Amino acid sequence: MRSPAELDHVHWHDLPHAYGPAEDVPELIRALYADDETAGDAIHELFGNIHHQGTVYPASAPAVPFLAHAVLHAPGRRDELLMLLAVLADHDPQHTASPSWPGSSVAAICTELARVLPDLLPCLGDAEPAVRRAALRVVAAVAARLPAEVRTTAERRVDELYATDPVAAVRADALAVLDLFGRETEAFDNPLPEVRLAAAMLAAERSGPPYEKRLVDVLAEDGAAADPGDDGFPRAGTASQEDRLTDLLTRDVDAGLTAAARWIAAGDPGARGSRLGRQIAETWRDRETEVLALMLAALPHQGDTRASAHCLTTIGEWIDRLPEPAAYLRDALYDRARGEEETAAPALLALVRSRDPRALELVLRNPDPEALAAAASCFPEAADRLIPEIRRTLAAGATGNGAIALIAALAQYGTAAQQAQPELLDCLRTRRAAVVAARQIGLGGHVTAEITSLLHEAAQSTDSSLSAAAAVAHHRLTGEAEPALRVFGGLLAGQGPVHWHLSSLQPLGSAAAPLLPLIEPLLTARYEWTRMAAAEAHHKVTGSPERAVPILAALIGPTPVGLCALRALAAIGEVPDELRPTLRSFAFSPLRLLSAMPFSHVHPDEELRTLARTLLTTD
């Protein structure tokens, strides 16, 4: 350990942390010995600069012996200082085999912490349980890096805590540390639920899924406790006990559904059951029926409007995956959608997506933009009733995502959407959702001097997305290519991400042939999004798949750009034979390969699976 008197012996100005030279570290360490509030502020600052969002720096290791001194000699906040030391040393054990490990900042931290650990071991006997737990966390951080004699002493002290500590959470943490020392202790029949839970979690981590029934029983029974011990981090990593438990149960879908059902039946304490259910839906395919039943069962147990809305939103996100949503589920949504609470909106949206006929009447009675847009998609036969409401909502001044959703909803109505031309022109004129308005105007097929004038003006906008959309719309309505070629010529020759512009010009088709000298060099661009969009555009312009297909095939994978490449390949209709194993993995994986994306009404993973299955049927 090193006392504050030695701080000036370190050349802190030569050591970087998150915000530059670590010249402020000595002052912060000295502040640890001041009053409680000053020390708290200093700890907060140290968490931000020598340990910034999980990253450590060259200045972090030299701070360790000074922090260890403060643990023993500063007047308070011992548990927080111990936790700072522990998280500084966090690392994946597998990383120690990396060639870069010996010279890394985290390796230096572990070396320093292992050196001072003998001085910190008395903290395991501190009167405060929080200090004992934090001290266990420090031991856990370097358990695999300790010299033999230190390891023996540390293991003995931890074993004493496991056997005798009066606080159950401390015993559970001690059990987790003993596991790091290679001590596999089965404690499933321990009288303390915290210890049973810790033992089951450790056994599940060792065995992997599927878990034995006895493990699932313990995880389900004791995991619903009001306090699962998520105020400490007894093992390496900053995931809480609750997060670790949720992650473990999500890996085994049947175990997870069993535990979530028991937790919800027990009152869904801490919304743990409903949260686990949501994570299962996002992780596993084709389990929507079970998850939606869990969400419905959890609704009466939610303690506030926000928690209830989370359950209803989850139902709304997945209900259209059910071939025929059960009547009891639709009835429950209908009852909530008619209410006056804030949960009425997500309930109505879920009811619309269930395609329950009663939803249409509720939407027309209270035409919220998001519900209107969803109704337009789910009830295409009701165009004569929905289009007037969409027009009224747009005319009333809808903006932002609401206006975008309403205009996008019009696209599926074909020629009937021409009724909304006045509102679309006003959106373009007032720049409300102007990009999607310009696109929809271009699809309307109606040409007037006012329309072409507005589109011509918008095509000169400094907003590149608007100028591109207006130029394409102008071409679609007039057949004139020159204005669009000028716009896209400038956009493709400019700086910045051009893949947006490449995607926008595709409706020009062969009329964009003069732009090929700008498009072709982008087929080999370093940025994968640019290569993907260039390949798609090249095919649209030339009609030839020869250059596009190899580029798109090379990009296909369970990533956002891979999905876009797959979509483009599906439009071309060619499947290289070497791609078929990848497509089969996309089509038949039980796990979701893509996560949800904001503002996307179709889950990317569902689209990935559908496209893969479609392409597998292509000769």
Image (tube, helix red, strand yellow):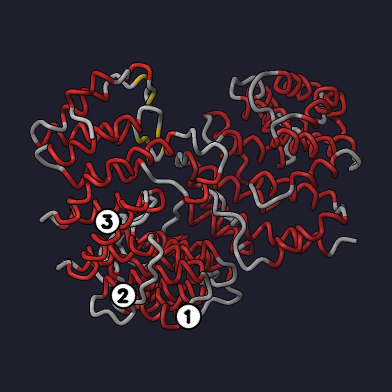
**Label 2 neighbourhood size at 10 Å, few (<14), some (14-19), many (20+)?**
many
* Nearest to viewer (mark 3 / mark 1): 3
* Nearest to viewer (mark 3 / mark 2): 3
Dot 1: element? loop
Please give the name of the residue rendered at 55% of the width and 34% of the height, measured from the top-left corner.
426
Question: What amino acid is labelled 1 in the image?
Answer: Glu
CB-based contact (under 8 Å), mark 3 and mark 1:
no
Report x, y in % for residue 522: 78, 28
Query: In the picture provided, is 226 more to the left or to the right than 598?
Result: left
Please give the name of the residue rendered at 44% of the width and 64% of the height, measured from the top-left corner.
362
Q: Which comes before the other along the chain, label 2 or label 1?
A: 2
Dot 3: element? helix
- Disc marking residue 373: none
Near-viewer residue (577 or 200): 200
Q: CA distance from mark 3 to mark 1?
A: 34 Å
What residue is disc 3 on?
Answer: 153
Report x, y in % for residue 475: 77, 30
Q: Which comes before the other along the chain, label 3 or label 2?
A: 3
Residue 300 in view here: no
Near-viewer residue (368 or 138): 138
In the image, is residue 407 above or below residue 450? below
Near-viewer residue (552 or 516): 552
What residue is disc 1 on?
Answer: 212
Q: CA distance from mark 2 to mark 1?
A: 15 Å
Q: Quadrant of residue 523?
A: top right
What residue is disc 2 on?
Answer: 196
In the image, is residue 63 above or below residue 138? above
Dot 2: element? helix
CB-based contact (under 8 Å), mark 2 and mark 1:
no
Figure quadrant of the N terminus: top left
